[in-house]
């Protein structure tokens, strides 16, 4: 049932329209810069902490701020802005990212840097809440899946190239230079959206009350809580990976970016495996990759002084880490009987709640026990998440019929 007062016509190109293909490519580039802006800071934390004369744990709070902002404001902002014409909305979002990254580049202290992280965190969930839907409209129903996959390639590209290359750029340009580079690319993509994308209006929507009914479903809420736990485990260690490589493993600062790139590269295998297996066994696959995540993180800490062993352990960690992104998104959306878009947005909020909690927990561990401790704490949390997946599966009979 739709709200007739909010029905807005769709103005999109035909499925074979080359303009639609170009627009989807530009959206993928926008996804790349959005994800790079969110996670680049992981590789910049040591340099930022030194330059601003703050502890690594204090710098890690910037990750928490971004994540909690997405968590708290994402669903509300997405619902409130979804009626806007999509090209205009995306251009505004990329301009916000350009301005925020420029502000980060000139930030004189942690407070201004915090503001520079708060603003794009408001815009990020709105982008993810509308980009997949817009790609489907642009491509047409026959190529909807391919279009959505193309947009999400921006995530893989960011994890593989954007974040590590940004870290390497910070060695050449400084961490402020890395943010200036992000600002320039954000502005460029905003211009590409303005001149290369047709007008795309929002489709019909369910009434908000109907969408919110999924929040009454215990199985859906359990899956949402599981995502919080999974991402807490992931980011308790990943937030401080660059610092661990530099201080515990003794990797030279100039080489940390290359190690992060390798971490992202092996993660492509996890993205493939997770996406292939999750449709039939969402909770079982969640548990499997949480166990692999725990093994990879704990082994990375235990083998921190053995470069070959560390490389293998990081590969296991990277595969599991990247696999859990699509696994959690698909699992939560499958758990929703309707309002799949809202379910996806809520999972983004849940994931960012976990990212923020992970940054806090990891920061406390590092401050109390040193840079290697975050990996062990994260491994314990990952095992708890694996057990949690079993509890959700057996606690809700419908979830047992995964195959």
Image (tube, rainbow, N blue to C red):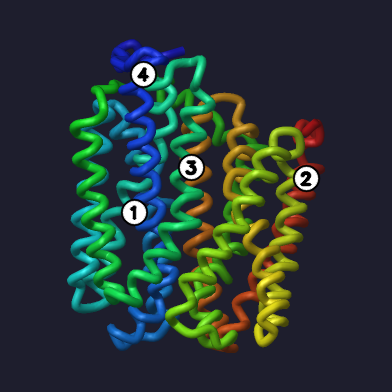
Please report whichever mark, 1 or 4, sits nearer to the chain's N-terminal start.
Answer: 1
Where is mark 3, residue-wise? 153
Query: Residue at 52% of width from left, 50% of height from top?
Result: 350
Where is mark 2, residue-wise? 284
Q: Percent from the top left, x then y, of residue 301?
A: 67, 79
Q: Percent from the top left, x then y, of residue 119?
A: 26, 55
Rendered position, 152 above or below 173: above
Where is mark 1, residue-wise? 121
Q: Quadrant of residue 23?
A: top left
Where is mark 4, residue-wise? 203
Q: Residues within 10 Å of mark 3 (few under 14, many from 20)?
A: some
Q: Residues within 10 Å of mark 2 (few under 14, many from 20)?
A: some
What mark, if any, has residue 72 been given in the picture? none
Q: Secondary structure at mark 1?
A: helix
Please report whichever mark, 2 or 3, sits nearer to the chain's N-terminal start.
Answer: 3
Query: Residue at 53% of width from left, 83% of height from top?
Result: 251
């Amino acid at each position: 049932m739709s709200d007739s007062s909010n029905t807005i016509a769709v103005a999109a190109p035909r499925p074979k329209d080359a303009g639609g293909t170009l627009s989807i490519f530009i959206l993928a580039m926008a996804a790349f810069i959005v994800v790079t802006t969110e996670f680049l800071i992981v590789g910049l934390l040591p340099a930022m902490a030194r330059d601003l004369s703050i502890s690594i744990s204090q710098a890690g709070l910037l990750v928490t701020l971004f994540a909690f902002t997405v968590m708290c404001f994402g669903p509300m902002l997405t619902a409130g802005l979804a009626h806007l014409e999509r090209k205009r909305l995306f251009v505004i979002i990329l301009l916000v990212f350009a301005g925020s990254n420029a502000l980060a580049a000139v930030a004189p202290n942690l407070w201004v840097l915090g503001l520079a992280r708060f603003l794009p965190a408001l815009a990020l969930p709105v982008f993810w809440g509308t980009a997949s839907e817009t790609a489907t409209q642009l491509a047409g129903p026959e190529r909807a899946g391919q279009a959505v996959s193309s947009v999400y390639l921006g995530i893989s590209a960011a994890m593989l190239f954007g974040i590590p290359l940004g870290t390497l750029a910070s060695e050449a340009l400084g961490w402020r230079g890395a943010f200036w580079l992000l600002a320039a690319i954000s502005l460029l993509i905003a211009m590409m959206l303005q001149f290369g994308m047709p007008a795309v209006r929002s489709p019909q929507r369910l009434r908000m009350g109907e969408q919110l009914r999924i929040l009454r479903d215990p199985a859906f809420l359990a899956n949402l809580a599981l995502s919080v736990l999974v991402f807490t485990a992931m980011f308790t260690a990943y937030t401080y990976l660059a610092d661990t490589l530099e201080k515990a493993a003794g990797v030279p600062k100039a080489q940390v970016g290359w190690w992060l790139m390798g971490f992202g590269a092996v993660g492509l295998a996890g993205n493939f495996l997770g996406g292939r297996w999750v449709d039939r066994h969402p909770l079982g696959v969640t548990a499997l990759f949480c166990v692999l995540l725990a093994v990879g993180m704990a082994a990375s800490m235990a083998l921190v002084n053995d470069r070959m062993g560390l490389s293998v352990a990081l590969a296991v960690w990277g595969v599991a880490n990247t696999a859990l992104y699509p696994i959690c998104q698909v699992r939560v959306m499958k758990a929703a009987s309707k309002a799949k878009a809202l379910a996806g947005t809520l999972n983004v909020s849940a994931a960012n709640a976990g990212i923020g909690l992970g940054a806090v927990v990891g920061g406390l561990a590092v401050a109390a026990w040193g840079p290697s401790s975050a990996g062990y704490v994260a491994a314990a949390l990952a095992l708890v998440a694996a057990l949690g997946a079993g509890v959700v599966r057996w606690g809700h009979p419908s979830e047992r019929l995964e195959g």
